[in-house]
Amino acid sequence: MKNLPLLLLALISIVFATTAQAQNPPEQARNFQINATHTGSTSSETLIPPLKQRWVVNFGQPMSYPLIADGKVYVTVKNAVGQGTTLFALDTTFGGLVWASNLGGTFPWSAACYENGRVFALNGNGLLRAFDGATGNMIWSVQFTQSVYNAPPTVSEGVVYVSGALKVHAVDANTGAVLWSSSVINGDTSSPAVSSDGVYVSYSCPNVYKLNPATGAKIWHYAPGCSGGGGKTSVLYNGRLYVRDFQDTIFDSETGTIIGTFNAKNNPAFSGSRGFFLDGPHSFGSFGTLRARDVNSNSVLWSFAGDGTLQSAVLVVNDYVYVGSAQGKLYAVNAASGQQVWVTTAGSSIPYVDEHNVSQPTTSFAAAEGLLVVPTSTTLVAYEGDTTPPTLTFGDLTPAANAAGWNNTPVDLSFTTADDLSGVQSAEPGSPLHFGSEGANQTQQVTVTDKAGNSATFTSPAVHIDLTAPSTQIQVPGVSQQQELFSSPVPVTLVASDNLSGVADIFYTINGGPAETYTSTFTLSADGNYTIEYWSVDAAGNSDAHKTRTVKIDSTAPVTQASVSGTAGTNNWYRSAVQVSLSATDNLSGVQTTNYQIDGGAIQTYAGPFVISTMGQHTVDYWSVDNLNNTEAVHSLAVSIDTVTPVVSATASPASAKKGPTPVTVTISGNATDGLSGVSSASFNVIDEYGVTQPSGPVTLQTNGNYSFTLSLPATKNGPDKDGHLYTIIVTASDQAGNSASATTSVRIN
């Protein structure tokens, strides 16, 4: 007895040591009904209904509840041939076989638990073995008293707890050493519910025990005073122990005091402040109704009947309750409202959890590592949540981009989202995306989240927006680009720039003609006025404002006309001062100056009509210059002025003669000269005082102006004429300008 405290201390040390090395990652299903307290609840962010089937394995035989840990699913299956069962390790990804081990035994029952990479399997004859979870290699085994074992083992903090054959055993998970064994009444069927302060088992009547986890010592025992075979697994939750028997009873887990009752065909499941009970008869072949109760008040919150044949285990994952039916339906019900959110057909019937039947392994559900694994009567079906992010499909731009892929207005880009399982929860930002600023290769990102919490971010197609028109310039030769006047052909160059989409085309028209596409410098050659209209269009379709430029080409000198006014004479002579007027025209650049000079004198700028009064022959040279300095060829104008009459003399010889029957011959002589234009002609005529027609005619002048001619005049005289018959001879001379003068002489017949 002196060594007992040391032994207890050693056992406690072993428990704490194994606890330290038994730290498991979360979300593993390591025991019957998920965990060591059998609450049938877990959380997995990826298991949000609706679910989809990942894989199914058809064993063709009944199977146990699955364990899910470290990427594998472990399940025991009744052997199709011979006795006993086989432990299978399946890959969680595809359901493929990793390894299998025949558990033997004379009963087709077995069950397992898992911790720290090891699977602990108990067959129906009480043989407990530890297998390496990765390879299936056996690590250790321990044989309990030969009897019928049909209560799933429970592992917690490095210790495996086994109930059977009137005993509860604690086994070191590392070595297989039995740490303690504690006697109980009956001792069958009840899988231990284990917490840090107690190991709970319940048997027929019910006989309920709370044992010390370190020593197996009895902490309390509820003994109603009866006994019998069998028992059922109890559930430890929130300081309460839920025990199922003929009367389902709630115990205070600390004191063992009865604090309430309930009804459940199978182990209830718990999450938060709710418990979930398949309320119905405690027998195979009967069905129940799923009810949620407030843990504290035990009041019913909601009920769900499904297809009327609910009979399976109950599991709570992420606030959704899963339950199956004899018709093979698997339901997901909202834990808060009881509303059905998903249903599927698992295949064959989803069986009742018959803990008293050793003809097949004890069944149930399990959920962990993103899987919900459901045994049916012959198949093991793995479901997964929505682990695939939603998809997004971008539509067309509104308005659509042009052929070059550009827009010149703000645009909207619509998109649609899809999720083939849980459905789309949100898209941020929403459709359509709005692009209002200009720029190339603009993108936006849309994050789409489904109802399972999966999200994906999508980058929109590149959007190109150019809101600014190009700028077009015209280039022509000259110091100033504003110059309009040119005296030679003009090359015209158009230059456009665009800082974003780039210039697509440059257009121009000449004098309102058809639009032409600019390709290279063009030349305006012929004289004339040109109005060039020009503009550009960029790749986005923006057009700058049409601009105009005037180009005037004048390579032709002006034309000057001269006019003369004065008293015109003959032979292009003027008999007065002359006024000269000059008139110049230039149809393009215009007349700059008109110039003239008289008789080779100084060049003068014409300002208005000018007068030439000096007599003589003059030459007026004149020409004009236009505004492009095109100079006209010099024109000459002859101006001749003679305002003086010729000088004429005349003498008759004889000056008198006697009357007689014979005509008298008279010689007329004299001189006719003109000092400027010169005498052009001379003539004579004779005036008879009696009115008798007398001769007249031309006078021939010698070079020096002298002349002489004879006349034959009748030597008659009227009787009454006392002073004689008078002949008057008039000699008239005209110069080249048309000036004329006369001289007279006379002959008298006495």
Image: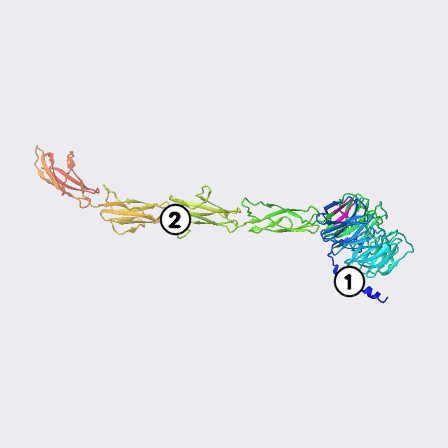
Identify the disc placed on residue 568: none
Amino acid type, label 1: Phe
Which residue ends up furthest to the top in the rendered image?
661
- Which of pointers 1 and 2 indicates the residue nearer the eye? 1
Work out whether residue 329 or residue 396 is closer to the camera in this orientation and state it.
329
Residue bearing the label numbered 1: 16
- Across and down, in percent, residue 744 comes to 15, 41
- Across and down, in percent, residue 123 comes to 81, 51
Identify the disc placed on residue 485: 2
Q: Is residue 377 left or right of residue 486?
A: right
Q: Main secondary structure of the magenta part?
A: strand
- Across and down, in percent, residue 280 comes to 85, 48
Work out whether residue 29 or residue 102 is closer to the camera in this orientation and state it.
102
Place residue 585 in its image quadrant: top left
Q: Is residue 673 visible?
A: yes
Crowd tier of the residue under label 1, counting other residues whose Cα lies within 10 Å: few below 14, some 14–19, many 20 or above: some
Position of the N terminus, as image quadrant, is bottom right
Magenta run includes residue 380? yes
Q: Is residue 234 above or below residue 13?
A: above
Q: Is residue 647 above or below residue 190?
A: above
Work out whether residue 278 or residue 299 is closer to the camera in this orientation and state it.
278
Which residue is at 84% across, 65% downward?
Answer: 4
Position of the C terminus, as image quadrant, is top left
Label 1 vs 2, first from the N-terminus: 1
Magenta run includes residue 509? no
Q: Is residue 53 left or right of residue 352?
A: left
The stretch in magenta equals: 372-381
The count of marks equals 2
